[in-house]
Amino acid sequence: MKVSEFNRLVIPIQQKIFRLSKRLLTSSDAREDATQEVMIKLWNQKNGLENIKNIEAYAMTMTKNHCLDQLKLKANNNLRLVHTNYENSSADPHQQLEAKQDWNRVEAMMKTLPKAQSMVLHLRQIEGYDYDKICEIMDMKPTAVRVTLSRARKNLVERLSKQQKNENRA
């Protein structure tokens, strides 16, 4: 694969690699390192990438695996599951504060989900991937992805409802 072809195929997905790293790793250094490591791995495999059907899914799988390896290696408080910050600049400050609080609540609940549910929910709802791509990235069957996503949504709604009921009682 030539450099120009690599740039055309791989460089556009660099931001998605970073966002997934950001989703999985809290430390800004760790997420930048993860993105760089995946890009280096892709560069080193550039001649073999021609045989890959879906380079984006391949890169996302590499990113997921690398980040999970980092979490296993460095299981400390600096590396934990997080989610991207939510911003709505068009709303007034009061609405922005409420939206931020709502998002923080959802983010906190997402952290409590099992890793597979959290990952599938992130890939579908935040990254906007279709089921086929999620299957490739997560190495799951389509039925398993749908079930995992359904359970993640159900768990999230139940936990948020329970939290809201507790807040209304107080």
Image: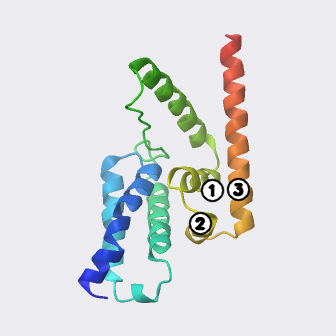
Q: Is the residue 141 above or below the residue 155 in the image?
A: below
According to the picture, the residue beneath numbered tag 1 turns out to be: 116
Badge 1 or badge 2: first in the primary sequence: 1
Badge 1 or badge 3: first in the primary sequence: 1
Give x and y (percent) for residue 137. Answer: 55, 68
Determine contact: label 1, label 2, CB under 8 Å.
yes
* Front in this rendered view, residue 36 or 147: 147
Q: Is the residue 88 above or below the residue 9 in the image?
A: above
Determine contact: label 1, label 3, CB under 8 Å.
yes
Q: Amino acid at mark 1?
A: Ala
Determine contact: label 2, label 3, CB under 8 Å.
no
- Identity of the residue furthest to the front in this view: 90
Q: Amino acid at mark 2?
A: Met
Q: In this image, 19 relative to 145: left or right?
A: left
According to the picture, the residue beneath numbered tag 3 turns out to be: 148
Q: Which picture quadrant has residue 70? A: bottom left
Q: Which residue is pictured at 41% across the width and 51% down the height?
A: 22
- Identity of the residue furthest to the top in this view: 170
Q: Which residue is pictured at 44% across the width and 22% down the height?
A: 97
How crowded pointer 1 is (Cα within 10 Å; few <14, some 14-19, many 20+) is rated as: some
